Image (spheres, rainbow, N blue to C red):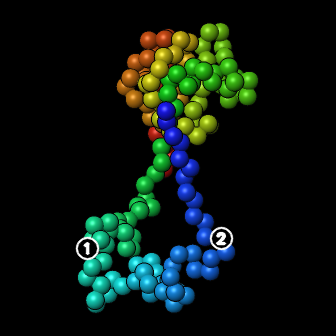
Amino acid sequence: MTITKRKKVRKYRGSKTHGGGSMKKRRGAGSRGGRGRAGSGKRGDSKKPSYWKDWEMGTHGFTSHSRSVTVAMNVSDLHRELPRLVEQGVATKKGDIYTVDLSVLGVDKLLGAGHIGVSVSVSVAAATPKAKEKVSAAGGSVVEEASED
């Protein structure tokens, strides 16, 4: 037979100091050595090694402001979005061949992930060799335009 014991919960209701002893004892931040990272100065040798371990003081490194962000699209995404692009007037369909200018969509690079099952003539700033291979295997072509950056 198992006996279930009730967990004792001490919430110190009605107690003035909540188990901290005298009123003087847990008064300010001095009882814990200061607030935050205080005490890492001349006589803070006990705290300094912990600061060395997780080095967070200040900022480290730099952020390059000249870095450009490349917006990319996979051939599978292009295949999926073609009907919607024709509806919006971004792409045109002449016979079985779609014609798309991806720079109008803000896409800089065509990537080769996935498959494409329709003939597409794509003009884009850059394309990977795998993307060109997949588009040409489906009966389309990729025209790479020089970007105006």
Q: Earlier in the sequence, mark 1 or mark 2?
A: 2
Residue at 43% across / 25% down in the picture?
A: 112
The kind of secondary structure element at disc 1 is helix
Residue 92 pos. (x, y %): 67, 21
Residue 94, quarter of the rendered image: top right
Residue 140: give x, y in percent of width and height: 50, 15
Image coordinates of residue 89 in percent, x first then y, are 72, 27
Front position in the image: 64 or 61: 61
Does residue 135 appear in this view?
A: no
CA separation, marks 1 and 2?
Answer: 40 Å
On residue 13, which mark appears? 2
User: Disc 2 on helix, strand or loop?
Assistant: loop
Question: Which residue corresponds to the image point at 38% horizontal and 65% vertical from the top-left?
Answer: 62
- Specify the label residue 9 is tagged with: none
Q: Is residue 122 above or below residue 7?
A: above
Of residues 104 and 67, which is closer to you in this image? 67
Q: Quadrant of residue 41?
A: bottom left
Instruction: Identify the residue at horizontal 69%, vertical 24% (top origin).
Output: 84
- Contact check, label 1 and label 2, Cβ < 8 Å: no
Looking at the image, residue 137 sits to the left or right of residue 61; the answer is: right
Question: Which amino acid is tagged 1?
Answer: Pro
Residue 22 vs residue 75, the one in the foreground? 22
Residue topped by disc 1 = 49
